[in-house]
Image: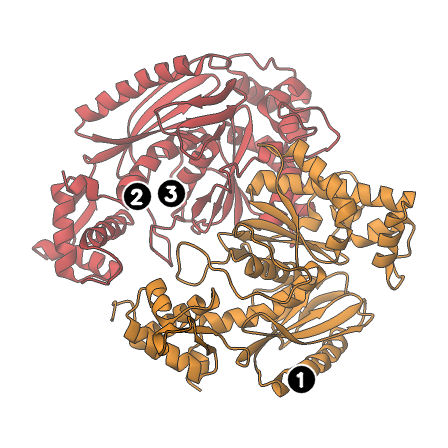
Chain colours: A red, B orange
Amino acid sequence: MANGTGPQAALRRRNLSRVLHAVATGDKSRAAVAAEVGLTRATVSTLVDDLIAAGLVSELGAQRPGTVGRPGTALALSARGPAGIGAEVGVDHLAACVVDLRGTVRARATVESRNRGRAAAQTLGELEGLVRQVTEEAVGLGLRPAGLTVAVPGLVGRDHHTVLRAPNLGWKDERTTLTVENEANLGALAELWLSGGETPPGASGTPGTPGTPETPGAPTARTPLTDFIHVSAEIGIGAALVINGGLFRGARGFAGELGHVPVYPDGPRCSCGARGCLEQYAGEEAVLRAAGIAPELPGRLKALRTAAADDDAPALAALEAAGRALGIALSGAVNLLDPQAVVLGGPLSELAPWLLPGVRRELGERVTGGGALVVESRLGRDGVLLGAAYSAIRAVLDDPSEWTAR
Amino acid sequence: MANGTGPQAALRRRNLSRVLHAVATGDKSRAAVAAEVGLTRATVSTLVDDLIAAGLVSELGAQRPGTVGRPGTALALSARGPAGIGAEVGVDHLAACVVDLRGTVRARATVESRNRGRAAAQTLGELEGLVRQVTEEAVGLGLRPAGLTVAVPGLVGRDHHTVLRAPNLGWKDERTTLTVENEANLGALAELWLSGGETPPGASGTPGTPGTPETPGAPTARTPLTDFIHVSAEIGIGAALVINGGLFRGARGFAGELGHVPVYPDGPRCSCGARGCLEQYAGEEAVLRAAGIAPELPGRLKALRTAAADDDAPALAALEAAGRALGIALSGAVNLLDPQAVVLGGPLSELAPWLLPGVRRELGERVTGGGALVVESRLGRDGVLLGAAYSAIRAVLDDPSEWTAR
């Protein structure tokens, strides 16, 4: 079996991960897994036994009535094994959830919280209370916490323990022992997971179809997306670039700063110091002001949606202008990157009916080769939190050896 | 030796390529090659013998005086083996060159030619004459033609035999038996080659330092660039994105259309149908008009450079505005991609002293995290042609088995 690329332990780690990824892409027998990963049935059976013993995989029983014994038994990811914990710091809320290996949300909590200008230590302290609450709930269900990722609306350092800037929280160079990640990146990861476009480690070729997470809308058949721009927004506007089935972070980890792409270069001054950034036209605060809604109002986005649905002229004009600005900035991005699609996610996606016409019109006029596919995320504002939980699950799938060794 | 990933022939092909890439990254002994690629000395020696017999590798003689025999003999890429042929269709010129495996230009020809609005068949026919001329010259020097790539200022189809649009030539959906590629992509490939940032096939880890091509300025030590935006311009403005040491082409092959990134969204109508594209401010024609120089004038770019050097006010203002527009468009690109650097290449690079201040000022004001490294290509306007020749050389390095089998 040795292929000369490293010691036995590394090989075993890799093979365990390959088997687990194969199981994750759909319930199948040991024989089917062996055929998929290109290992012998005996090797696969040993690895599967280890994964079952570790509680990562479970047997569903005979696949076809009439056949007996292990070879025909379908395997699935366990609903009681390791679980990913996701948490989210929003400007006005905190959230935490636990997701099992199959992608099902098993525990969840959200609280309103005024986090703008509040000390990071205080905000994160409150968040940790929420995390403890959902974790205890999940442990009670037989799940084992496998890792926590905290989504933040800001730039995160390469160490994933520093929030370099989160202007809408008032954070600058905040260090934490928690693992943090930019919210737009996590929203994109969730979308990638759902679309089945992600590339497993060491794999080349067809991406798999992962387990079906609990989602607001049932997933429909769609070409797996491997190259897309994921736009996400709460107060700021962030984007994440997915290239070749993986997150593209850039040289310093700052890729995806769509909110600071210039739209009208001589426009109003932005919080970043430049003029005419997208955020000045399509950021939540800019849109609310233009619509005549106080940006501090609780439930302000709902108020904006209601006003738009009621054909309120200032609200419609504000959303039309925001859609146009978003379309202009995205036209530049699409001309540069030529992605398969632009995915609109986060709270912004709830305003899609009013934003998308302007976005699509600008893309249609400005993109070389004629327009771009724009789709709404099926995860909506849940994408960020699910993506945070999923990043821990992904770590288990990529290296299950830590769990089988226990 | 078998590692189970495929038949012997595929393994031998891959190992030949790994050995050849190792030789390409600097003269070294068989023992050093074996250590680098992780194969036994015996295997490497057999592969090297095949590569020498095929004329792809040559022995430089004993590395250290006092040591004798093959193990101490340095290997280098052959100066008489396969050679890449590059050709270029410009709006006002045609060019062809032959480059050997070491990266040295061995034959070269350029002619002035009014190609705007001329039938593609006629232009390509004249180009083929030029290609024949340099090829005959190279064959006389003992080189063997290994492939031809033609650089065009336009969008190229995925088959690399169709020019979908080249508005400045007046081409639309032109099919050819020649292999064509977008000029900005080839300029980026040349820069990647020169910087040593490219990723050899199947390799992970440190990129190599390839042979030294003949360049206007001597290469200096620089961090290998693996992620950069290469801007290149003749009449239009194109860019190429290099990501993880390779060219990023996008879903339809249209990535890098920097010239149609919106700069002033309500600005003048562009040839693409949209308004306010970068090309309307920093394209050669726009700059020449603003400087009061006839865009049809032969030697017009030289005239512009001379005027700028003479502190001619309209020329300076035109270049200042162009630099500003380029900086605005690049700010968006850098905020999205967070590259290691922006490389300015093509004929535009000859105007760098007047363009760069505006580019750098806009990037400094608009880029999240503060500015971006902007460097001039050391290849200048030669980059595109060298990149075209190099793409054939790269094909030899990636699969030398076709040559060893002869």
Q: Nearer the viewer, residue A261 or A171?
A: A171
Q: Give the distance between the C-alpha atoms of the residues marked 1 and 2, in whole angstroms.
A: 61 Å
Res A332 quadrant in image: top right
Tag 3 subunit = A
Query: Which amino acid does the dot numbered 2 rest on?
Result: Gly
Residue indicated by mark 1: B137
Decide: is B81 above or below A390.
below
Q: Give the distance between the C-alpha atoms of the residues marked 1 and 3, in whole angstroms.
A: 55 Å
Which circle, 1 or 3, is nearer the viewer? Answer: 1
Q: Are marks 1 and 2 in contact (CB under 8 Å)?
A: no
Q: Is residue B129 left or right of residue A163?
A: right
Mark 1 surroundings: few (<14), some (14-19) or many (≥20) residues within 10 A: some
| Badge count | 3
Residue indicated by mark 3: A193
Residue depicted at 56% across the width and 56% down the height: B195
> Is residue B405 in view from this perspective?
yes
Decide: is A217 above or below B21.
above
> Is residue A72 in view from this perspective?
no
Q: Secondary structure at mark 2?
A: loop
Query: Which amino acid does the dot numbered 3 rest on?
Result: Trp
Q: Is residue A274 left or right of residue B398?
A: right
Q: Nearer the viewer, residue A320 or B233?
A: B233
Residue depicted at 42% across the width and 50% down the height: A224
Q: Secondary structure at mark 3?
A: helix
Q: Which mark is residue A211?
A: 2
